Amino acid sequence: MWTIAVWFTSERPVPIRVLKDVRRHGHRFALDQPSTPLVYLLSGQSRAATGTEAIAGLVGFLLDNRNIVDAFTVTEIRAVTS
């Protein structure tokens, strides 16, 4: 089990409703907005063989859900085993 955090920027604000709805996907993910505008933190837990696979799963979640964030730039990534 890996605990992953991905910080990213977005060209447009993510609606507050969407920030709360991400947890409904059942992937143990949370999408939060630190105090900096247009900077977001996607965090969660994932079962994967390596940290790279765990990170790919979390970033893949963003890619699969373009209705949440249509354009983004990942700025920092962290993954640790739980």
Image (spheres, helix red, strand yellow):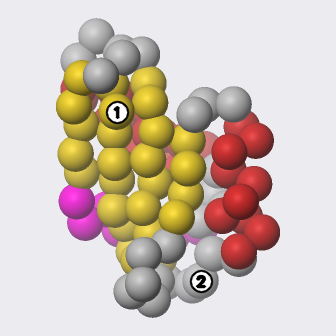
Position above or below: 14 against 20: below
Visible residue check, residue 67 = no
- Residue 6 percent location from the top left of the image: 34, 53
At horizontal 63% and vertical 57% (from top left) the residue drawn is 66
Quick one: which residue is furthest to the top in this view? Answer: 49
Visible residue check, residue 34 = yes
Name the mark nearer the viewer: 1 or 2. 1
Say which residue label 1 marks.
3
Say which residue label 2 marks.
13
- Residue type beneath disc 1: Thr
At horizontal 34% and vertical 39% (from top left) the residue drawn is 4
**Local SS, label 2:** loop
Question: Callout 1: 10 Å neighbours few (<14), some, many (20+)?
Answer: some
Give the numbered dot on residue 63. none
Magenta range: 70-76
- Residue 28 percent location from the top left of the image: 57, 34
- Residue type beneath disc 2: Pro
